[in-house]
Amino acid sequence: MKALTLTADFAPKPDYQLNDRERTTHRIQAGSQVWKNPHINIGQTADPTPKDDEVIIKVGAVGICGSDMHMYEPGKDGYILYPGLTRFPNILGHEFAGTVVEVGKHVRDLKVGDMVAAEEIQWCGECISCRRGFVNHCDNLEELGFTTPGAMAQYIPVRARYCWSIQEIADRVGSESEAMVMGAMVEPTGVSYHAMFNRIHTWQPGAYVVVFGAGPIGLAAIALASAAGASQVIVFDTSPSRREFALKLGATAVHDPVGADLNGIILDATYGRGVDFVVEAAGVPNHTLAPLTKGLAVNATICHIGRSERPTPLELEYYQVKGVQLAGSLGHSGHGTFMNVIRMMASGKLDMRPMVSARMALDEAPSAFKRLESRQDAKIILLPNA
Ligand SMILES: [Zn+2]
Ligand SMILES: [Zn+2]
């Protein structure tokens, strides 16, 4: 089959201490400290066969994620920008939907022909974190498209337990190919859903919401806030094209944050009350959360999704006086998140297609990655079997 593989040199930085597991398996906790000179290429690789608990999925659609860009784009020192769990060479792609074409012999709940989306978080179900219900923080985590083969390929093996039917979406839109494109966006939308409704869900319909960053995760947060009854969704992003996408997905106001008085803008828009719920999806908390003080309402909640290795100074005295809480959020598994996102898409309450700026064949992936370097697009979808 055809697949897009990322290769990189294993070159731990001098001050990075590899543990034994990293040394023997090259499954690296902090990718940006180890992988140098990344390259992508499209080539032929062996067709996958299912293990007993796996299905083989014929990929209908797969999105290119900001994380894919951070593995593909080196920083000035030649190392990948992505700071998380990685192992190379590997097939990229973790936002996808497809059709089951083969099932392992222990698979009970899926059959050939089922249309599914799959979780990227490959939780083990057995470690203490999983058994406590925190599957996104699995102690034995593998990540599809990061440490295990991804979906920028014609076929992918996935354990059945990570798959969710998207039949409901296909029934709603009346088109399998559209259901695939929508299904490919369940994963990134689930990341925002998990942050907004599973971590610290203090906000209610009518709330004022601020979203920092209008990349795909921020755009999903905007659409979810809007669908869930936020009375205002105020969005900050430096890119004019992304501010346009934000307006299409339900933002009530958009602003360029550069040089802006964040607290002043928020207080003006909220009649002096401040914002009730904040989503950080820009990955620059030192520019978004650090200056945010008077713009936070009493009992405001901040959810941090965007990744940043930088320390961020926060005005904790203000948090204490106003009863502000801050939650980190990672992943999209557990709590029926995929199921609920699929239902929202199927009901017509959530349609992420306005953020898709191009649909391209897998062969065109290298030019799609190149095009995304400018951050003008929100989401490009690849169609590996088109
Ligand atoms: Zn992603
Ligand atoms: Zn686990």
Image (cartoon, rainbow, N blue to C red):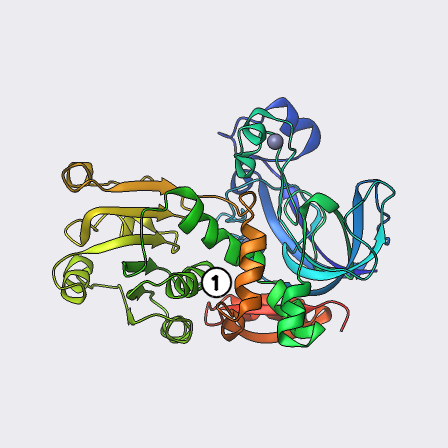
Judged from this view, the residue extending furthest toward the left is 272
Judged from this view, the residue extending furthest toward the top is 20
Query: In this rendering, is residue 28 above or below 370?
Result: above
Kindly identify the residue that appears in the image at 44 percent across and 45 percent down: 198
SS class, disc 1 = helix
Q: Quadrant of ligand 2?
A: top right
Give the left or right position of residue 145, taking residue 273 as reference: right
Q: Position of residue 37 (x, y in %)?
A: 60, 50
Q: Which residue is mark 1?
A: 216
Task: Give the residue type that dot 1 points to.
Answer: Pro
Q: Position of residue 155 (x, y in %)?
A: 79, 58
Give the left or right position of residue 258, taking residue 12 as reference: left
Ligand 1 has an atom within 8 Å of the beta carbon of the residue at disc 1:
yes
Query: In this rendering, is residue 230 above or below 130?
Result: below
Check the picture and name the quadrant holding the N terminus: bottom right
Check the picture and name the quadrant holding the C terminus: bottom right
Q: Is residue 71 visible?
A: no
Query: In this rendering, is residue 357 above or below 165?
Result: below
Q: Is residue 374 visible?
A: yes
